[in-house]
Amino acid sequence: MLIALAGLALLAAIVLPQLLVRLTFSRHAADRPDIPGTGGELARHLLDSFGLGHVRVEVTDRGDHYDPRDKAVRLGERNLNGRSLTAVAVAAHEVSHALQDDRGERSFTLWQRLAALAAQTDRIAGLFFIAAPILAIFARTPMALIALVLVGVALLAVRVVVTLVTLPIEFDASFGKALPILEEGNYVARADLPAVRSVLRAAALTYLAAALISLVNLARWVRLLR
Protein backbone atom coordinates (compact mmCIF):
# COMPACT_ATOMS: atom_id res chain seq x y z
CA MET A 1 0.00 0.00 0.00
CA LEU A 2 2.77 2.43 0.96
CA ILE A 3 4.68 1.59 -2.20
CA ALA A 4 1.58 2.26 -4.30
CA LEU A 5 1.01 5.62 -2.57
CA ALA A 6 4.65 6.55 -3.03
CA GLY A 7 4.38 5.66 -6.70
CA LEU A 8 1.28 7.82 -7.13
CA ALA A 9 2.96 10.71 -5.31
CA LEU A 10 6.00 10.41 -7.56
CA LEU A 11 3.81 10.29 -10.67
CA ALA A 12 1.95 13.40 -9.51
CA ALA A 13 5.23 15.22 -8.86
CA ILE A 14 6.30 14.52 -12.44
CA VAL A 15 2.97 15.15 -14.20
CA LEU A 16 1.62 18.14 -12.25
CA PRO A 17 4.32 20.68 -13.22
CA GLN A 18 3.79 19.96 -16.91
CA LEU A 19 0.00 20.08 -16.48
CA LEU A 20 0.31 23.39 -14.64
CA VAL A 21 2.37 24.84 -17.48
CA ARG A 22 -0.19 23.84 -20.12
CA LEU A 23 -3.17 25.09 -18.12
CA THR A 24 -1.49 28.43 -17.40
CA PHE A 25 -0.53 28.99 -21.03
CA SER A 26 -4.03 28.05 -22.17
CA ARG A 27 -5.75 30.28 -19.58
CA HIS A 28 -4.09 33.41 -20.95
CA ALA A 29 -3.85 32.44 -24.64
CA ALA A 30 -6.92 34.34 -25.88
CA ASP A 31 -6.15 37.19 -28.25
CA ARG A 32 -6.75 40.63 -26.79
CA PRO A 33 -7.70 43.69 -28.90
CA ASP A 34 -5.90 45.97 -26.42
CA ILE A 35 -2.54 44.26 -27.03
CA PRO A 36 -0.95 46.29 -29.83
CA GLY A 37 1.32 43.63 -31.35
CA THR A 38 1.88 39.92 -31.71
CA GLY A 39 4.38 37.89 -29.75
CA GLY A 40 6.62 37.75 -32.80
CA GLU A 41 6.46 41.51 -33.28
CA LEU A 42 7.30 42.09 -29.63
CA ALA A 43 10.24 39.69 -29.85
CA ARG A 44 11.58 41.52 -32.91
CA HIS A 45 11.09 44.89 -31.24
CA LEU A 46 12.86 43.84 -28.03
CA LEU A 47 15.76 42.22 -29.87
CA ASP A 48 16.30 45.37 -31.92
CA SER A 49 16.01 47.53 -28.81
CA PHE A 50 18.83 45.59 -27.15
CA GLY A 51 21.04 45.69 -30.23
CA LEU A 52 20.37 42.08 -31.19
CA GLY A 53 19.26 42.69 -34.75
CA HIS A 54 21.25 39.64 -35.88
CA VAL A 55 19.00 37.32 -33.86
CA ARG A 56 16.17 35.97 -36.00
CA VAL A 57 12.55 35.41 -34.96
CA GLU A 58 11.13 32.22 -36.45
CA VAL A 59 8.14 29.93 -36.16
CA THR A 60 8.61 26.42 -34.77
CA ASP A 61 6.59 23.31 -34.03
CA ARG A 62 9.08 22.07 -31.44
CA GLY A 63 8.16 24.31 -28.53
CA ASP A 64 9.11 27.91 -27.81
CA HIS A 65 12.87 28.28 -27.34
CA TYR A 66 15.98 30.29 -28.08
CA ASP A 67 18.62 28.54 -30.17
CA PRO A 68 22.07 29.91 -29.21
CA ARG A 69 23.76 28.06 -32.05
CA ASP A 70 21.58 29.51 -34.83
CA LYS A 71 20.94 32.79 -32.95
CA ALA A 72 17.18 32.50 -33.32
CA VAL A 73 14.18 33.04 -31.07
CA ARG A 74 11.66 30.41 -32.10
CA LEU A 75 8.00 30.65 -31.13
CA GLY A 76 5.06 28.38 -31.76
CA GLU A 77 2.59 29.69 -34.35
CA ARG A 78 0.09 30.71 -31.69
CA ASN A 79 2.65 32.74 -29.75
CA LEU A 80 4.34 34.13 -32.84
CA ASN A 81 1.14 35.48 -34.38
CA GLY A 82 -1.07 35.77 -31.32
CA ARG A 83 -1.91 38.94 -29.38
CA SER A 84 -2.34 37.32 -25.98
CA LEU A 85 -0.71 37.66 -22.59
CA THR A 86 0.82 34.22 -23.09
CA ALA A 87 2.30 35.26 -26.45
CA VAL A 88 3.73 38.47 -24.98
CA ALA A 89 5.19 36.82 -21.88
CA VAL A 90 6.66 33.83 -23.72
CA ALA A 91 8.21 36.10 -26.37
CA ALA A 92 9.85 38.22 -23.65
CA HIS A 93 11.07 35.07 -21.88
CA GLU A 94 12.78 33.71 -24.99
CA VAL A 95 14.28 37.10 -25.86
CA SER A 96 15.73 37.10 -22.33
CA HIS A 97 17.64 33.92 -23.19
CA ALA A 98 19.10 35.76 -26.19
CA LEU A 99 20.21 38.50 -23.77
CA GLN A 100 21.85 35.93 -21.51
CA ASP A 101 23.72 34.58 -24.51
CA ASP A 102 24.75 37.99 -25.85
CA ARG A 103 26.02 39.11 -22.44
CA GLY A 104 28.03 35.95 -22.04
CA GLU A 105 26.49 35.22 -18.65
CA ARG A 106 28.46 32.52 -16.89
CA SER A 107 25.49 30.28 -16.09
CA PHE A 108 24.23 30.38 -19.68
CA THR A 109 27.70 29.63 -21.04
CA LEU A 110 27.99 26.69 -18.64
CA TRP A 111 24.59 25.45 -19.76
CA GLN A 112 25.64 25.62 -23.43
CA ARG A 113 28.71 23.50 -22.76
CA LEU A 114 26.81 20.99 -20.67
CA ALA A 115 23.99 20.82 -23.22
CA ALA A 116 26.49 20.01 -25.98
CA LEU A 117 27.96 17.25 -23.79
CA ALA A 118 24.48 15.97 -22.93
CA ALA A 119 23.56 15.75 -26.61
CA GLN A 120 26.49 13.38 -27.12
CA THR A 121 25.80 11.33 -24.00
CA ASP A 122 22.10 11.09 -24.94
CA ARG A 123 23.05 9.45 -28.22
CA ILE A 124 25.34 7.04 -26.39
CA ALA A 125 22.67 6.41 -23.76
CA GLY A 126 20.13 5.51 -26.45
CA LEU A 127 22.42 2.80 -27.76
CA PHE A 128 23.48 1.71 -24.28
CA PHE A 129 19.97 1.17 -22.94
CA ILE A 130 19.02 -0.84 -26.01
CA ALA A 131 22.07 -3.03 -25.56
CA ALA A 132 21.94 -3.14 -21.73
CA PRO A 133 19.75 -6.30 -21.46
CA ILE A 134 22.11 -8.17 -23.78
CA LEU A 135 25.19 -6.87 -22.00
CA ALA A 136 23.70 -7.92 -18.66
CA ILE A 137 23.56 -11.53 -19.86
CA PHE A 138 27.31 -11.50 -20.40
CA ALA A 139 28.01 -9.57 -17.20
CA ARG A 140 27.99 -12.67 -15.03
CA THR A 141 30.51 -11.42 -12.49
CA PRO A 142 29.49 -8.87 -9.80
CA MET A 143 32.20 -6.44 -10.90
CA ALA A 144 31.05 -6.54 -14.53
CA LEU A 145 27.45 -5.91 -13.49
CA ILE A 146 28.49 -3.00 -11.24
CA ALA A 147 30.51 -1.50 -14.10
CA LEU A 148 27.46 -1.80 -16.37
CA VAL A 149 25.23 -0.01 -13.87
CA LEU A 150 27.85 2.70 -13.29
CA VAL A 151 27.89 3.44 -17.01
CA GLY A 152 24.11 3.88 -16.96
CA VAL A 153 24.32 6.14 -13.91
CA ALA A 154 27.04 8.27 -15.48
CA LEU A 155 25.08 8.74 -18.70
CA LEU A 156 21.93 9.76 -16.84
CA ALA A 157 23.84 11.99 -14.43
CA VAL A 158 24.91 14.28 -17.28
CA ARG A 159 21.30 14.93 -18.24
CA VAL A 160 20.35 15.50 -14.58
CA VAL A 161 23.11 18.09 -14.19
CA VAL A 162 22.01 19.87 -17.38
CA THR A 163 18.36 20.05 -16.31
CA LEU A 164 19.26 21.27 -12.83
CA VAL A 165 21.58 23.96 -14.24
CA THR A 166 18.78 25.00 -16.60
CA LEU A 167 16.28 25.80 -13.82
CA PRO A 168 17.98 28.94 -12.42
CA ILE A 169 18.66 30.12 -15.97
CA GLU A 170 14.95 29.82 -16.75
CA PHE A 171 13.91 31.70 -13.61
CA ASP A 172 16.41 34.46 -14.37
CA ALA A 173 14.99 34.76 -17.89
CA SER A 174 11.46 35.07 -16.51
CA PHE A 175 11.88 37.19 -13.39
CA GLY A 176 15.35 38.69 -13.67
CA LYS A 177 14.83 39.98 -17.20
CA ALA A 178 11.45 39.42 -18.92
CA LEU A 179 9.22 40.73 -16.10
CA PRO A 180 11.23 43.95 -15.55
CA ILE A 181 11.34 44.52 -19.33
CA LEU A 182 7.57 44.15 -19.67
CA GLU A 183 6.81 46.13 -16.53
CA GLU A 184 9.24 49.01 -16.97
CA GLY A 185 8.53 49.29 -20.70
CA ASN A 186 4.76 49.40 -20.10
CA TYR A 187 4.28 46.60 -22.61
CA VAL A 188 1.40 45.22 -20.54
CA ALA A 189 -1.19 46.93 -18.36
CA ARG A 190 -0.50 46.93 -14.63
CA ALA A 191 -3.73 45.01 -14.05
CA ASP A 192 -2.36 42.20 -16.25
CA LEU A 193 0.94 41.81 -14.36
CA PRO A 194 -0.32 38.99 -12.08
CA ALA A 195 -1.34 36.99 -15.15
CA VAL A 196 1.97 37.74 -16.84
CA ARG A 197 3.85 36.59 -13.73
CA SER A 198 1.95 33.29 -13.78
CA VAL A 199 2.81 32.73 -17.45
CA LEU A 200 6.47 33.57 -16.83
CA ARG A 201 6.50 31.19 -13.88
CA ALA A 202 5.05 28.47 -16.09
CA ALA A 203 7.66 29.21 -18.76
CA ALA A 204 10.40 28.78 -16.17
CA LEU A 205 8.92 25.47 -15.01
CA THR A 206 8.92 23.81 -18.42
CA TYR A 207 12.18 22.03 -17.55
CA LEU A 208 11.09 20.97 -14.07
CA ALA A 209 9.31 17.82 -15.22
CA ALA A 210 12.36 16.84 -17.28
CA ALA A 211 14.57 17.33 -14.24
CA LEU A 212 12.30 15.17 -12.09
CA ILE A 213 12.14 12.40 -14.68
CA SER A 214 15.91 12.43 -15.03
CA LEU A 215 16.31 12.19 -11.26
CA VAL A 216 13.84 9.29 -11.09
CA ASN A 217 15.68 7.39 -13.81
CA LEU A 218 18.99 8.06 -12.10
CA ALA A 219 17.62 6.81 -8.77
CA ARG A 220 16.49 3.57 -10.41
CA TRP A 221 20.00 2.87 -11.64
CA VAL A 222 21.59 3.84 -8.33
CA ARG A 223 19.31 1.32 -6.56
CA LEU A 224 20.87 -1.45 -8.64
CA LEU A 225 24.18 -0.70 -6.95
CA ARG A 226 22.77 -1.38 -3.50
Image (cartoon, rainbow, N blue to C red):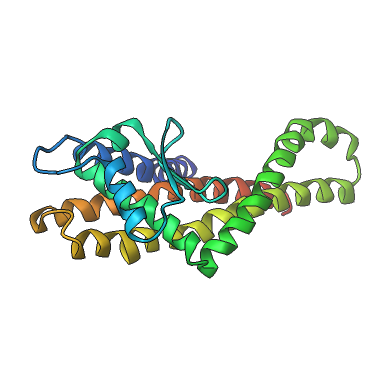
- Residue 6 rendering spot, x and y as whole percentages: 45, 46
Tell me: 53 left or right of 140: left
Q: Is residue 109 visible?
A: yes
Q: Is residue 102 left or right of residue 37?
A: right
Residue at the image point whose x is 20% and y is 45% from the top = 85
Residue 136, image x, y percentages = 83, 36
Which one is in front, 8 or 154?
154
- Residue 183 % position (x, y): 19, 62
Quick check: 136 left or right of 159?
Answer: right
Query: Looking at the figure, which quarter contains the N terminus?
Result: top left
Residue 52 point in image, percent of width and height: 42, 56
Residue at (15% x, 53% y) in the render:
188
Above or below: residue 15 compared with residue 219: above
Q: Is residue 218 left or right of residue 164?
A: right
The C terminus - image quarter: bottom right
Residue projecting furthest to the bottom: 106
Q: Which of these two is toward me, 81 or 131?
A: 81
Name which residue lies at 75% across and 34% down: 127
User: Residue 63 occupies which quadrant of the picture?
Assistant: top left
Camera sees residue 202:
no
State the residue in front, 61 or 59.
59
For the point 14% across and 44% down, the residue is 35
In which quarter of the view is residue 172 placed? bottom left
Badge count: 0
Residue 201, above or below 87: below
